[in-house]
Structures are given as C-alpha cells and as structure tokens.
Image: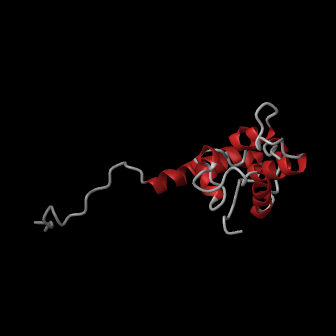
Amino acid sequence: MVHRPPAAARRPRSRAVLSPARVVGNALSVSVFGVFLPLAGCDDTEFHTREVVHAPPFDEVRAVFDRACIGCHVGVAAEAGLDLSTDPCGALDAAGLVVPGDAELSPLYQRMRSTSAPMPPTGRLGEDELSIVSAWIDGGAECSPES
C-alpha cells in the first residue's frame, strides 16, 4: 500500500491556469518573434513623428506668471479662486487648466492666446511669453513650486 499524505498536506495539482508572468512572457515571445523581428532594420521615422519638445525650466514659466498673472491671481481674493502665488502647479492641476504634453488642449494656454477674452485681461501676452508657456506644457508641464 502506498502512503499518501493527508489531503490538507498535499500540493494542489496545477490546472491550465496561466499566471500573469507566464501570460506576459508568452505575449512577449509572440510579439518579439511574430511582430517586431520582421521590423528590425526598418526606417522607424513613420512611427516617431512627434517632435521632441525641450521644455523651459519652471522658473521661466513662473516669471511669466509673476509678471502677468499674480496681479489678479493671488491670495484669498484670487480671481476665479486661482491662487498662483504659493503653489502654482497645484492650483493649475486642481483647476484642470493644464493638459501635460498638449498646450493646444490646455485651457490655460487657450485663454492666454485668446483674442476675444485673453488672459491677462490687460492684454495678450507677447509671443515670447506664449512660446515659453506652450513649450512648458508640451514638454510635460513639469514644475517645482520651490524653484
């Protein structure tokens, strides 16, 4: 007679269940050998059509805010509740005014370049200031309120 350990001590038999690691491994092996290998040596310019944007440092963007925006967007009486004086990044994020990577979709940039209702209301920003803000947003809108 064969001695069998009690049911609780026996190791459960593996069923045909794939672990996430095995699924990923299988997917990679298929994609590496089935899709990517034939593309080796191809000209990949058609896959990389977006221009790399070099964002200006946040201190340049903050200088634009300080010159053009802080007059109205400061403290508890900040226009539209948007206080840019202490944590401009947090304020812009909380208000949903910046779409990192896409200035054209960012309400902040749209309002700054508007001809009908520009910000600041005293007059549209100059092209150099608009390009700083645009490049900063297109570059990912990375910022540090301390800088």
Of all residues, the one furthest to the left in this rendering is 1
The quadrant in which the N terminus is found is bottom left
Instruction: Please state the horizontal and vertical placement of residue 108, each as a whole percent of the image.
Output: 71, 43
Question: Is 103 rendered above or below residue 7?
Answer: above
Q: Residue at x 64, y 56 (%)?
A: 89
The residue lying furthest to the front in this view is 77
Q: Residue at x 37, y 49 (%)?
A: 17
Q: Quadrant of the C terminus?
A: bottom right
Instruction: Give the answer, above or below, for where 141 lies relative to 45.
Output: below
**Image quadrant of residue 120?**
top right
Residue in view at x 68 percent, y 49 percent: 100
**Closer to the camera, 26 or 91?**
91
Measured along the vertical axis of the image, is residue 73 above or below residue 109?
below
Q: Report the residue that reaches farthest toward the right.
A: 127
Is residue 125 in view?
yes
Q: Nearer the viewer, residue 100 or 39?
A: 100
* 115 sits to left or right of 26: right
Relative to 124, 102 lies left or right: left
